[in-house]
Image: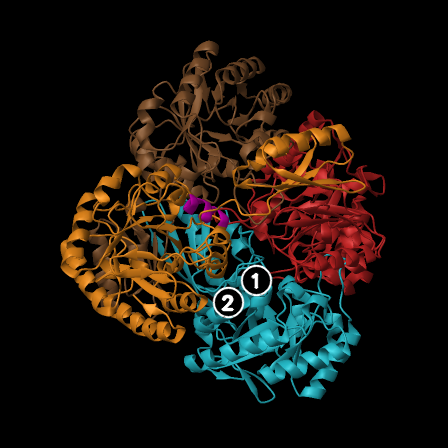
Chain colours: A red, B cyan, C brown, D orange
Amino acid sequence: MIVILKNNVEQAQVQQLVKDFEAQNFAVHMSQGTNTTILGLVGDTAHVDLEKLLTIDIVRDVRRISEPYKAASRSFHPQDTIVQVGGLRIGAGTFTVIAGPCSVESKEQMETVAASVKASGAAFLRGGAFKPRTSPYSFQGLEDEGIRLLTAAKKATGLPIVTEIMSETQLPEFEDVDIIQVGARNMQNFRLLKELGHCNKPILLKRGLANTIEELLMSAEYILAGGNEQVILCERGIRTFETCIRNNLDISAIPVLKRQSHLPIIIDPSHAAGNTWMIEPLSRAALAAGADGLMIEVHNNPKAALCDGAQSLDLPQFEALMQDIKKRAAFEGKELQ
Amino acid sequence: MIVILKNNVEQAQVQQLVKDFEAQNFAVHMSQGTNTTILGLVGDTAHVDLEKLLTIDIVRDVRRISEPYKAASRSFHPQDTIVQVGGLRIGAGTFTVIAGPCSVESKEQMETVAASVKASGAAFLRGGAFKPRTSPYSFQGLEDEGIRLLTAAKKATGLPIVTEIMSETQLPEFEDVDIIQVGARNMQNFRLLKELGHCNKPILLKRGLANTIEELLMSAEYILAGGNEQVILCERGIRTFETCIRNNLDISAIPVLKRQSHLPIIIDPSHAAGNTWMIEPLSRAALAAGADGLMIEVHNNPKAALCDGAQSLDLPQFEALMQDIKKRAAFEGKELQ
Amino acid sequence: MIVILKNNVEQAQVQQLVKDFEAQNFAVHMSQGTNTTILGLVGDTAHVDLEKLLTIDIVRDVRRISEPYKAASRSFHPQDTIVQVGGLRIGAGTFTVIAGPCSVESKEQMETVAASVKASGAAFLRGGAFKPRTSPYSFQGLEDEGIRLLTAAKKATGLPIVTEIMSETQLPEFEDVDIIQVGARNMQNFRLLKELGHCNKPILLKRGLANTIEELLMSAEYILAGGNEQVILCERGIRTFETCIRNNLDISAIPVLKRQSHLPIIIDPSHAAGNTWMIEPLSRAALAAGADGLMIEVHNNPKAALCDGAQSLDLPQFEALMQDIKKRAAFEGKELQ
Amino acid sequence: MIVILKNNVEQAQVQQLVKDFEAQNFAVHMSQGTNTTILGLVGDTAHVDLEKLLTIDIVRDVRRISEPYKAASRSFHPQDTIVQVGGLRIGAGTFTVIAGPCSVESKEQMETVAASVKASGAAFLRGGAFKPRTSPYSFQGLEDEGIRLLTAAKKATGLPIVTEIMSETQLPEFEDVDIIQVGARNMQNFRLLKELGHCNKPILLKRGLANTIEELLMSAEYILAGGNEQVILCERGIRTFETCIRNNLDISAIPVLKRQSHLPIIIDPSHAAGNTWMIEPLSRAALAAGADGLMIEVHNNPKAALCDGAQSLDLPQFEALMQDIKKRAAFEGKELQ
C-alpha cells in the first residue's frame, strides 16, 4: 500500500505518521522527492481501511498495490479450485452444463425438462423456486412447493440440482439442493453471504449487473472467509449504455478472473442475452475464452413459461446446442461433465 | 401496451391472438400497414409479463406505453405524499436534513454528534448499526448495541432516528427506529421489501448504484403494494465510466422522480461524493433542483471514524453547511423541518 | 413508427394531425382506447425527425419500429457483403487477420514486422502514420513519412496495407493505402465520413468507445449513402464501469451486427484489452462468436514501441497466435485469407 | 510517478532500471519491502508514456501521482481564467447566458430569436450552421449561409455569436464568429484541436458523451499547448445506463473541474435533458453548484424547428427562465453578463 503525502508537510508530522504505521506492525519505506513524500507500507494490508487513511491531515492519496481479497486470490492459492458434487467436478479442465427452466412451474414440466436435458448431456438441473422479480405483480415462484418439485425431478433422473436462495432464513429448505445459487441482485447481500460461509454446500455466486470484478471477488471472499471453500463464480452480463440488447456479456471477465482467482467460472448466456438467438454464439465464445461451464435456460414450452420465456431454449434447441458444445469441448480438450 | 407483429403473418393467426388478448379482458385495437400489423392493448397492463408476450411466434416486439408501477405513480396519485414522523413533515414544500455518523461507534460519539447536529438544525439523527461493507474484513457495525446507543441518543436529544436494516430478520430490533433505511445494495432484496410493506414505519429507500429510476419506483411499489404508504426515495449517486469521483450524483433524478411519482426525495451527497469538499456544492444543487431534503454524514472526529471518515463533515463544517442551507431553503420558500 | 397521443385530446386535433401525416405520404392507422390514442405511420420513416414529432402539442411519445438506417440494414440487403481487396475477400465465410505495429516508427521496424507477420499468415499489414493521442505531449506519428514507410513495406512484401485517417484533408496522401481506417474517436466525425462516402476505397469503421450499435450503423450509413459500399465494421471494446481492464470487448456486438447488417465485422482485441495476455482468449472468443477477422498489434520490440507497447504482441507471440487461429478457423469452416 | 516492480526481481536489473530513469533526468527514490520494490520518479512526468513503462520486464504496475495536463491545471495556474469577448467577461464570479436555436434556419428566425433573447438578458447568441447529425438523412445545417445569417443577427442586435466548427478546413469562414464551439463528438478530433490552438479566438469545448473529466482537460490542453489560452469548458450530459432521460447532467463535474482547473465552465442543460421541462431545475442546480454560465436552446417556434425542437424553449419560456436566473445570480453574488 502506498501513502502519498501532501506537499510541504513538516518533518515531525511525517515521523509521527511513520511511527503510527510501525505501531500497527507495518514496515514503512519512505521515498522523499523535492515536493512529494511517499510511504510504502509493507505487511498485511488486506484489513486496512483505505478511507480512514484518507482522513489523515497530511495524506493526499492512498493506493493499494495488492488485492483486498486473499482467500479468493490466485496469489495465495495458485492451484485451480475444483468443486465436487457427487462424482462431478467443476473447474480445472472440465466443462459443466447446468440447464433447466427459469422457474419451476409444475411436476410435469420438471419431469419433462429434467429427462430431456439429461438425455442431451446436461450435468445439473436448474429451476427457480423463489424468484426475484422487478415487479411485485410478476409471478414470484412456487416457493417451498418448487423446491419439492425440483427434488422430485432429481430423484427421478439422478441429476443434481441448482436453485436460488433469496434470504438466509430459507436455508433449512435447501437441504436437498446440491448447489445454492446467489442471484445477481443479492451479490452484496452480506447477511446472506455470511450465512452461506457457514454452510457446507457449493455456492454459485452471480455477479451483480453493475458490480466490478473486484467486488465479485470480495463477495466470494465473504463466503470463503466463513470457511466454505466451494464457490463457483458466474458472469451473466453487465449493464452498459447499450440499449439494443438486455445486458452485455463481459467476455473479458473470463481471462481476468482466471488470472486473479482460482475459483471456477460459469457463464449464463441466457440472462445476458434476454433472447434465444444469441445463446449459441455467446456459448461458443464463452467456451473458447476459457469458461468452465454454462448455465442455460431450457423450457418444454417457452411460450407458456411463467418467467423469462423469451430467453428459454426449447428442448430440441437445447439438444442442438449440446451437440455443438460436445464437439467444441472435445476440440478444447475439456472433459464434459 | 403495443404489440408489433412480424411481417407477413397469416390473418388467422392474428385473429387468434386478438381473441386471446380479449379473453384476458383487454380491448384490442388493430392497425394494419402494408407490412406491419400493430395491436394496441387497452386495460390493466401493469400485471402483464412483457417477456411472455415476446415468446409468441408472430410477435416481433412489445412496448409499454404506461408505467409498470401504479401505487408509486403520480398518474394515479397526483398529490404529493407527505411522510409524517411526530410533528415533522417530509415532502410537499418542506426541507428535511438527516445527519449523523456513518456508523454508531460509542455512547460518547452518539451523544456528542446528536447534540451538535440538533443545535445546528438537523431534524433527524442517522447512524449505522448494521453496516453493509464490501470487504468481510471491514468493521461490520455494533449491531444490536448500535441500535441501543442510537435509541439512547434519541431519548437524550428528542431527535427521531434513521438507521439501515439488512435483513427482514432484524425487524424486531427496529421497534424504536423512526425511519427504516434500505441501503443501495438491498434495493432489490425483494424479501426484505415485502416485509417492509407490512410494517407501519416510514421507509427510506436508497437507489442502487446502477438501478434505473423505473427500477427504483418498482422497488417502492413492492412496499406500497404491501400496504405501507410511507416511502421516501433517496438518490445517492450512480455508477458511470468516470473514475475521478466515487459516484455521479444523478441530479436529473430529482425532476424526473417529481414528475413520475408523488413520493418525497432525499439526496445523499456524502455517499455520492466520497469526500467532504463536494458536499456543499452538491447540497446546494440538490436543494435548487427541488429535493425534499438531505442526508449528510457527520462525525465528531472524522479521522478516527471506523467507517467512511473521508466523506464525513466534522461538527463545525456541518454547522457552516446548515447556515447556508437555512438561507437557501428560505430563498426557495421551503419550510425547514 | 408509432405516435402515442396524450390523454383526452380533442377529436378535431387528432383529425388534423392525421391529415398532416397523410400530406407527408404516410398511411396512418389509428388505434383508439378509452384513454390513449395511437397512430401507426406506414411509409418511409427513415427520414422522419423523431424529435420534431415530439414537439407537437398532442403527442406524448414516439417510437420507431424499423431501423433508422437502410443501406446498412440486412432487411434491405439480405446477402452478406464481401469487401474485396486484390484477391482477398473479407466477409461471408472467410477469416482475415490484419497485423502490424500501433505506429510506424522506422524503415527497419516496418520491414521486419511486415516480413514476419506475412510469414505467420497475416493477410494485411497495419501501422499508424497519423496517431490520435489523448495527450498533446505523446508521440503523434511520423505522418507523411509514415505513409511512405508503410507503402515501401507493402511493395517489399506484397501485403496490402491498412492505416488510419484523421481528417478529410489527408485523403490525397492515402492513394496507395488499401483500406482506410476511421478511428473510434472519429466514428462521428461526419465531415470525414461524408468524404469517405465519395472515395472508392474500403473503409474500416471502428466503433466509438461509448457508441451504440445503432450509432455505428448510422455512421456506416453516412459512407454507404455517399455511394461507397465497401464498409467493414470494427468492434474494439466499449467503456463501462469496470476499472480493472481498459475496455470491455462487446462480444454480443458480433451476433447483433450479423443480424442487423450485411457488413463484415473485424474484432480488435488489442485495443480492447490494453495488454497482451488477454489477446489470445479474446481472439478465440471472437472467432467462435462469428467474427470475420481480427486486427492485432504486433511489434518487433514492444518494449521500445513509441505507442501502445503494453498491448503489442512480439513476433513469436503473434506466430503462436496464428498457429492457434489457423486450427480454429479450420474447425469453424472459415477460409483464412 | 510510482513504478511498482514485480516480486523477486534481481538486484542488478533494478539498478539498471534506476540508471535508465536517472539518464532521463528523473530523481529516483527506492522503497524496498520484503516482496515488493517501489520506485518513485521525481521530475517532469507529464511527458512520460505510461504504457511504455508497462512493457519493461520487471515492472508490474505504474501509477501517476500528478495530473497528465499542465496548462489546464490549477496547480500551475491558481488564478481563475477569465475569457473576455468585447466588454463581456466569462468566469471568476460572472454568470453568462448563451441562447439561440439549435440550427440557423432563416433570416426571420434569427432576427426574431436574437432580438428576443437579448431583451430577456442573454449575453451571447448561439445557432448551428454546420450540424453534426447522427443520421445522414437529417437536416445538416445551412452551412455558409447559416454563418452569414448569424453574422447578420449579430450586426442587428450587437450580440456576439457562438457557433460550432466541424473541421479545421472551415476556419476561414469563422472570422466573424466570437466564440468557436467544438461539439461533444469532436472533443477528441485532435487535428481540429491543434488548429484551434493556433487561432486567436475563444473556444467553447464540449465534453464528449462518455469522456472522463481528465480526457476533457487533456483536450483543453491540446488547445492551450498551441498557445490559445481562451478555453471555456462545457458539460452537456454524459451517457449512462439510465434510459428514461437522454443524458445525465454530471453536476459533480462543476466542483471537480473548479478544483482541478482554472478554466470557466458553462452548462448546457438543453442537450443533457432532451426536453424542455427539465431545463429550469437543471439550470438552477448548475448555478447553485458553481457554474459560470448556461447555454440554452431557444426557438421562436419549436414545433417547426428543423433540429432539436423537443428541447428548445420558446421565447416566453426563455424570458421566464431568465427572470428566475437573474434573482438566483444575485443571490449567489454573481454578476450577470
Q: Quadrant of residue B321?
A: bottom right
| Residue located 61% across and 34% down the image | D53
Position of the C terminus of chain B by quadrant: bottom right
Image x and y of residue D57, in percent: 68, 29
- Left or right for D244, reference B311: left
The residue at which mark 2 appears reads as B282
Distance from disc 2 to disc 1, alpha carbons, whole Å, reads 8 Å
Q: Within 10 angstroms of label 2, few (less than 14), some, or many (20 or more) residues?
A: many
The chain to which mark 1 is attached is B
Residue on which the image places disc 1: B273
Q: What secondary structure predominates along the stretch shown in magenta? A: helix
Mark 1 residue type: Ala
In the image, which residues are magenta? Answer: D214-221
Structural crowding at the residue carrying mark 1, measured as other residues with C-alpha within 10 Å and reported as few (<14), some (14–19) or many (≥20): many
Residue B155 against residue D219 in the figure, above or below: below
On the image, the x and y values in percent for residue B333 come to 42, 82
Give the residue type that dot 2 points to: Leu
- Chain letter of the residue carrying label 2: B
Give yes or no for residue B54 being in the magenta stretch. Answer: no
Can residue C304 be seen? yes
Residue D302 lies left or right of residue C33; in this view the side is: left
Q: Nearer the viewer, residue D47 or C301?
A: D47
Residue at point 54%, 34% (across, down) = C271
* Circles 2 and 1 on the same chain: yes
What element does badge 2 sit on? Answer: helix
Which mark, by number, is residue C181? none
Q: In the rendering, at what x and y percent does residue C86 appear?
A: 41, 15
Looking at the picture, tell me which residue is in the foreground, B16 or B316: B316
Along the horizontal axis of the image, is C86 left or right of A46? Answer: left
